[in-house]
Amino acid sequence: MNEFVLNHPLITHKLAILRDVNTGTKEFRELVTEISTILMYEAMRDAKLEETTIETPLEKMDTGMLNEDHYAVVPILRAGMGMVDGILNVIPNAKIGHIGLYRNEETFQPVEYYYKMPEGIANREVLVVDPMLATGGSASATISRLKLDGVKKIKLLCIVAAPQGIKTIEEEHPDVEIFCATVDRELNDNAYILPGLGDAGDRVYGTK
Ligand code: PRP
Ligand code: URA
């Protein structure tokens, strides 16, 4: 099992507000940011630190620091952009790549329309972010595209995952760890997550 689920009563509380159809755009964005920050802390639990010496006001100390330059965040447009501020709260110097995908409404297959990565992407650890993992098609296509560019270490951060999406990633990319805030029940006939939160892109951008 390559998946980690945030199990915490306060996450359930935040998700309840996020899911609620009456929650407005501002609060929705703020909660996506907050939950993304917490997901990022979990995703970085295995981070390698470089040894360094610092000076406190009282004495010298040997400690460890992160090489932030080693990381890239790749939001899946559009909704993934909503998570970027939350990730950058943790690693402000991470480079950002973008991939644009939309789901064909009949086949649910992802269609790529944009791809731009930072220099040296193959040597960075990449955090792919998207609030929704439904069929898993968009995330899997993103990971495959990054692997074509030579990326070796990839983590997937999402807020709401469906069992089908997790299965897709585990089968197609067993090397990729998934960090999510919750795993919901199932997909409906339109491949929307139930109970879910609706269309994440529309809710982040207020487009519907
Ligand atoms: C949503 C979501 C994911 C994708 C998940 O994006 O943000 O990218 O669907 O579905 P999947 O796991 O079945 O691929 P959407 O295609 O609605 O585009 P948008 O972010 O531009 O609204
Ligand atoms: N994309 C969304 O935005 N929401 C879903 O429930 C499924 C895919």
Image (tube, rainbow, N blue to C red):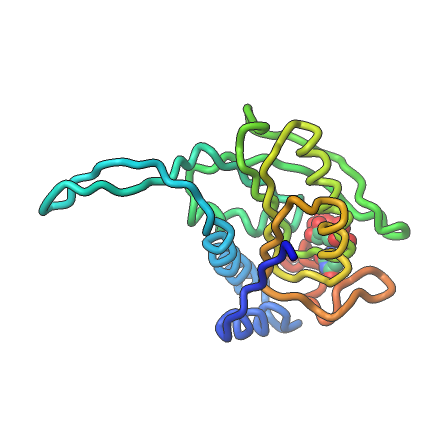
Question: Residue 143: which quarter of the image?
Answer: top right
- Comparing 65 with 15, the one in front is 65
93 vs 106: above or below? above
- Comparing 175 with 100, the one in front is 175
How many discs appear? Answer: 0
Name the residue: 30% across, 36% down. Answer: 51
Where residue 151 appears, as percent x and y from the top left, is 62, 32
Q: Left or right of 114: which side holds 74? A: left
In which quadrant will I find the C terminus?
Answer: bottom right
Point out the quarter of the image occupied by ligand 2: bottom right
Name the residue: 62% across, 36% down. Answer: 98
Name the residue: 69% across, 68% down. Answer: 184
Where residue 31 appears, as percent x and y from the top left, is 52, 62
Res 205 seen here: no
194 vs 178: above or below? below
Q: Left or right of 65: which side holds 129? A: right
Instruction: Check the image and name the residue furthest to the left.
Output: 58
